[in-house]
Amino acid sequence: MGSDGTDRERPGEGATLWERTGGLTGLVQSSLPATVLVIANSWWGVYPAIAAAVGTGVVVMLVRAVRRQPLRPAFGGFVGVAVAGFFAARSGEARDFFLADIWWYFAASTVLTVSILLRRPMVGVVWSAVQGVGMWWRHDRPSLRRYDIATAVLAAVFAARFVVMRTLYEHNEVGWLTVSKIAMNYPLWAVALVVVVWAVRSADHRIGYCRDRSTPATSG
């Protein structure tokens, strides 16, 4: 850590996003409930499929607990599966298993876009809160622009997932909904993470540079 405190842990340092979400095992486990839903729906119908999907989520949590693996990703996934199962059970349609995800993507994209328009890009706001520092970067045009770009990329990721999955939902393509949910997960997030890390590191470099320049003026 540098003497100015700017070299704190950043996204991508220490445990990576891939590691925090369980790596390959986490990817497989997170995709299991939706996959089971599609297979079970084709064999037994929607309600047994919902029960099978939720049951799979419970099994994933138990397996991780027995292996003493982090439960946070599994618990978050289970809550998502439970909510998805509720929507599907209420309507009796398997495609509604993906409804909560679809509207979450829309809401997230909207919030991120609005934050840019308000000149408070969400990436910068969240990073400042995590670091416990003020939003000085709002008065530094290069830093603000970098956070705008990073937030816009995240908004685009959510918007792309919303458009694709909403279209498949309208056509009742349950199998392709599962495929798109898995295929558009890690690849898009990997691209977004690269941009977010670039923005954060650039902004942190700017604050260190500005502090270095202001020190002689304030010391006298």
Image (tube, helix red, strand yellow):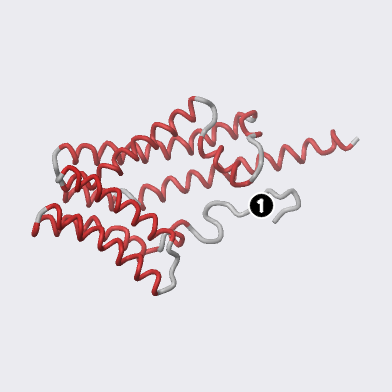
In the image as oriented, which residue stretches furthest toward the top?
117
Q: Position of residue 26 (x, y in %)?
A: 36, 62
Disc 1 crowd rating (10 Å Cα; few below 14, some 14-19, many 20+) is: few
* The C terminus lies in quadrant: top right
Q: Residue at x 58, y 52 (%)?
A: 10
Q: Is residue 63 above or below residue 211?
A: below
**Quarter holding residue 30:** bottom left
Closer to the camera in the image, 70 or 184: 70
Q: Could you tell me residue 9's position as x and y percent?
A: 60, 54
The residue tagged 1 is: 7
Q: Residue at x 16, y 55 (%)?
A: 38
Q: Quadrant of the N terminus?
A: bottom right
| Total marks in image | 1
Front residue of 182/55: it is 55
Q: Position of residue 114 (x, y in %)?
A: 45, 28
Residue 46 percent location from the top left of the image:
13, 52
Q: Is residue 36 above or below residue 208?
A: below
Q: Nearer the viewer, residue 95 or 203?
A: 95
The residue type indicated by label 1 comes to: Asp
- Is 41 rendered above or below residue 118? below
Q: Is 99 displayed left or right of 14 in the figure?
A: left
Say what secondary structure mark 1 lies in.
loop
